[in-house]
Image (cartoon, helix red, strand yellow):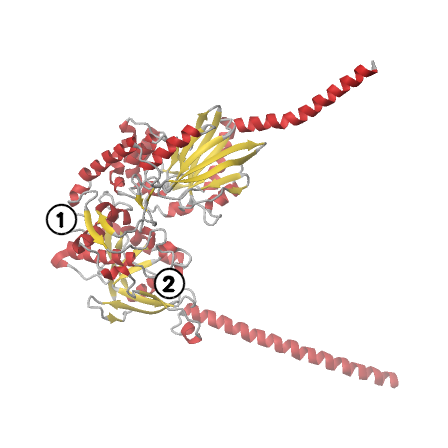
């Protein structure tokens, strides 16, 4: 009997040990069974076709991205969802049929995307343009991705927009069923993205408030295995709006982070949330596989797959791109007498690659070329009625592509200045003409000198003006010299109260007024008309040609290139339009001070005087105390003796 009991005890102990060993394995199998693979992109910006790479090859393009998506789905070991975090439009000639044909959403649908959100550039054609695009997408009858947007919506009175949103089915979130998993996906748009869409007409709810509410709704009603946020807010150096979103809101498993064109070599982990980005312009396909470990979401695989020349074109997507290209030529380019791949000029040199453009605070020949093209285009448009342009300027933030050695086509020129639409509703920001004083021009140069180090999109590239700055001087007082450059090259001093004609793009013109607020009123630029009246509607300042058509930024560049045939060698290197002259020489640091520098110098002088007085008081007080001790000692001695 004892032997039987011992055997039963051994069997029981073995069973307990096996249970302890096998339970984690069963849990691991359960976690693996709940794993999910996410294929993702963001900021694809209408890149249907491969673009020239800095190494001489090519990168990107929906035609190749489609191939990678198919390959990854075929080899995936887990359920797959395909997601995009917005700004799928505005970046190539294909956007010119955005409102009429919705090529972007139709392409995402053809590539098998499940869900996307709206980025700020989806609003470049304003609320009406977006509504037209949504309706065109539905009218196509083709497969389309779901659209989610929880915090950036039309106001109640915009009935046309709401009708289009409802017809398409734009919602706060959607739920995907994949291999027994329930995957909830919602979308938000951040503060900076909202500021980059000044004509959207949308109402903005803080992203954390909206996200917290939608996550609670999903958890209450949907029984999700995963909650994924498509956020067009962004990260920067591992921080940024999406970092703060993850920290502020519990329960988000993954944030696909768009808007800042970031690339995360590894997922960023914040408050139990994984944040990932794969870069802009379809340069990579992001692949993230996640699984549950208890209540935690963990990464089991993360890859950024380059979309390069090693990836073959997908025949179906290539055919779709060709179809859209034909529509672009018929519906848009025909008005300009141009073809999609028509050669406008040739260049014997490369311009700064777009990945490096504005990375340093300095003159750049690409910016000079664009600014000069504005002057040329206004001359051509106004003919005999031409009023001299004193200052043409382009900001780095609106330059979207660069030019390379060899043939430069219509498509290449458009890609450089591809943003926005005009007052006429047609694609492309138009040029505008405003007037500002010489004193305000100096403030504009200070924006370039002082704001650029903290916001590279504010860097300015001029035609008709020159300035020199010392980066070691006090902020907003760094410009040491400036002058107007006449057509013959002669430099003349600026007159403070004189009005100067300034030509720039519509978007950049609208941002001029923001200088006052961004500099806390230290710098002031108030655009005016030729009579000195303050401009309140920048669309009234749009420049038209003699046929009444708007002069578009991109066409200014295209026509200037076409007029040269071969790009002038002067654009192969800087010409001294902007000069950085660093110096720690005290005279150079303090010469020509404005009130900011004077105030800081005065404050520093007061601090020095106070420090000197305090030191003198401490030293003097210490001496008196020592003397008092000696006197007190002698008095006490006398009293004792007496």
Label 1 sits on a secondary structure element that is: loop
Tell how many labels: 2
- Vertical arrangement, residue 557 with respect to residue 424, above or below: below
> Which residue is label 1 attached to?
547
Where does residue 474 sit, x and y in percent of width and height? 43, 67
- Nearest to the eye among marks 1 and 2: give it: 2
Residue 329 is left or right of residue 226, and the answer is left
Q: Is any part of residue 108 visible from this angle?
A: yes
Residue drawn at x 54%, y 35% is: 297
Left/right placement of residue 616 relative to residue 493 reads right
In the rendered image, residue 44, in percent from the top left (x then y), is placed at 35, 41
Q: Quadrant of residue 84?
A: top left
* Residue 448 coordinates in the image, percent (x, y): 36, 61
Q: Does residue 638 appear left or right of residue 577 in this picture?
A: right
Q: Which residue is mark 2?
A: 449
Can you see residue 537?
Answer: no
Q: CA distance from mark 1 to mark 2?
A: 39 Å
Q: Quadrant of the C terminus?
A: bottom right
Determine the secondary structure under disc 2. Answer: helix
Question: Quick one: label 1 or label 2, which is nearer the N terminus?
Answer: 2
> Which residue ends up furthest to the top in the rendered image?
1
Q: Nearer the viewer, residue 596 or 103?
A: 103
């Amino acid at each position: 009997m004892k032997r039987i009991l011992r055997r039963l005890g051994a069997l029981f102990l073995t069973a307990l040990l096996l249970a302890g060993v096998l339970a984690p394995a069963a849990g691991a199998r359960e976690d693996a069974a709940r794993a999910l693979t996410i294929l993702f992109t963001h900021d694809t910006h209408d890149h249907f076709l491969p673009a020239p790479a800095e190494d001489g090859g090519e990168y990107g393009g929906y035609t190749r991205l489609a191939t990678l998506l198919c390959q990854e789905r075929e080899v995936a070991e887990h359920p797959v969802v395909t997601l995009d975090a917005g700004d799928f439009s505005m970046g190539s000639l294909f956007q010119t049929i955005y409102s009429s044909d919705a090529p972007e959403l139709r392409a995402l649908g053809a590539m098998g995307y499940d869900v996307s959100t709206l980025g700020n550039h989806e609003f470049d054609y304003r609320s009406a343009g977006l509504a037209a695009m949504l309706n065109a997408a539905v009218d196509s009858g083709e497969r389309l991705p779901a659209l989610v947007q929880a915090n950036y919506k039309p106001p109640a009175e915009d009935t046309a927009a709401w009708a289009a949103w409802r017809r398409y089915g734009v919602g706060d979130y959607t739920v995907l069923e994949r291999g027994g998993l329930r995957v909830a996906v919602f979308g938000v748009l951040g503060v900076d993205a909202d500021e980059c869409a000044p004509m959207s007409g949308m109402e903005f709810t803080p992203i954390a408030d909206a996200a917290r509410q939608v996550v609670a709704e999903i958890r209450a009603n949907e029984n999700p295995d995963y909650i994924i946020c498509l956020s067009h807010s962004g990260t920067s150096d591992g921080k940024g709006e999406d970092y703060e979103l993850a920290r502020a809101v519990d329960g988000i498993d993954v944030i696909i982070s768009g808007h800042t064109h970031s690339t995360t070599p590894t997922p960023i982990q914040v408050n139990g949330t994984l944040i990932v980005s794969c870069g802009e312009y379809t340069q990579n396909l992001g692949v993230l596989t996640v699984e549950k470990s208890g209540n935690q979401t963990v990464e089991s695989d993360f890859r950024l797959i380059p979309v390069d020349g090693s990836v073959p074109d997908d025949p179906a997507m290539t055919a779709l791109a060709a179809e859209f290209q034909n529509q672009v030529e018929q519906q848009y380019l025909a008005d300009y007498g141009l073809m999609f791949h028509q050669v406008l000029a040739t260049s014997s040199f490369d311009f700064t690659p777009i990945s490096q453009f504005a990375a340093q605070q300095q003159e750049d020949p690409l910016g000079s070329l664009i600014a000069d093209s504005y002057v040329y285009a206004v001359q051509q448009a106004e003919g005999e009625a031409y009023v001299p342009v004193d200052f043409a300027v382009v900001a780095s933030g609106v330059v979207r592509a660069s030019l390379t050695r060899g043939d430069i086509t219509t498509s290449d020129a458009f890609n450089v200045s591809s943003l926005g639409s005009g007052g006429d509703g047609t694609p492309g920001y138009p040029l505008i003409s405003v007037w500002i004083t010489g004193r305000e021009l100096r403030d504009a140069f200070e924006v370039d000198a002082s704001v650029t180090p903290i916001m590279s999109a504010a860097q300015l590239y001029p035609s008709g003006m020159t300035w020199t700055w010392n980066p070691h001087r006090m902020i907003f007082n760094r410009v040491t010299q400036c002058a107007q450059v006449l057509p013959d090259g002669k430099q003349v001093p600026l007159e403070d109260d004189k009005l100067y004609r300034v030509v720039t793009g519509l978007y950049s013109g609208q941002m001029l007024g923001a200088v006052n607020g961004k500099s806390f009123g230290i710098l002031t630029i108030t655009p005016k008309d030729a009579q000195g009246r303050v401009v309140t509607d920048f669309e009234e300042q749009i420049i038209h040609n003699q046929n009444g058509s708007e002069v578009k930024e991109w066409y200014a560049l295209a026509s200037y290139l076409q007029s040269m045939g071969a790009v002038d060698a002067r654009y192969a290197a800087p010409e001294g339009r902007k000069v950085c002259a660093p110096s720690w020489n005290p005279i150079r640091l303090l010469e020509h001070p404005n009130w900011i520098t004077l105030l800081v110098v005065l404050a520093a002088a007061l601090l020095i005087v106070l420090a000197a007085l305090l030191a003198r008081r401490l030293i003097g007080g210490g001496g008196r105390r020592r003397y008092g001790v000696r006197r007190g000692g002698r008095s006490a001695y006398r009293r004792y003796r007496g």
